[in-house]
Image: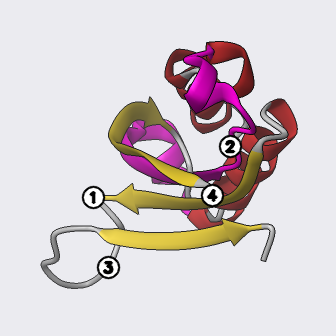
Amino acid sequence: MYLIRMKNCAFFARHGVLDEEETLGQRFYVDAALTVDPGRALEDDSIEGTVDYGVAFQVIERIITGERRFLIEALALEVGKALTLRFPQISRAEITVRKPNAPVPGVLDHVEVTVAWPE
């Protein structure tokens, strides 16, 4: 087993509960920590048995920039499920979604959630 980390993948999207969040949109940031069972891929230096980072990024992008979700938790879960479906060698996907402009009555850097799939 080994771990792939994709950090700070940035996308513009329109998620959130408030109508203004859909109208204005904002940038969302995603981290993916993927636990991978490569079989013989590392020993054989073979991309076929491991995770193609470019394809993984496209999977994340399709979901984050796709259908509006009220909860960033739902986004994180959907990303984790999609990555493990696309790459069966991923035994666990831990997905963090950050929302820098969360509508809260105060000053903060960002709100983030982390969801692991499978649990």
Residue annotated with mark 4? 76
Residue annotated with mark 3? 104
Q: Which residues are magenta?
A: 18-46
User: Which dot, 3 or 4, sits closer to the camera?
Assistant: 4
- Say whether marks 4 and 1 touch (CB < 8 Å): no
The amino acid type found where label 1 is placed reads: Pro
Q: Tell me the number on the disc at residue 100.
A: 1
The single residue placed furthest to the front in the displayed view is 43
Q: Nearer the viewer, residue 81 or 1?
A: 1
Cα gap from disc 4 to disc 2, whole angstroms: 13 Å
Q: Secondary structure at mark 1?
A: loop
Which of pointers 3 and 4 lies earlier in the amino acid sequence?
4
* Residue at the spot 48% in from the left edge and 61% down from the top edge: 96
Which of pointers 4 and 2 lies earlier in the amino acid sequence?
2
The single residue placed furthest to the bottom in the displayed view is 105
- Give the image location of residue 83, x and y in percent: 73, 40
Can the viewer see residue 93 in this picture? Answer: yes
Cα gap from disc 2 to disc 3, whole angstroms: 20 Å
Which of pointers 2 and 3 lies earlier in the amino acid sequence?
2
Cα gap from disc 4 to disc 1, whole angstroms: 15 Å
Q: Tell me the number on the disc at residue 114.
A: none
* Residue at the spot 62% in from the left edge and 15% down from the top edge: 46
The amino acid type found where label 3 is placed reads: Val
Residue annotated with mark 2? 68
- Give the image location of residue 40, x and y in percent: 71, 32
From the image, which quarter does the N terminus lie in? bottom right
Q: Nearer the viewer, residue 104 or 44?
A: 44
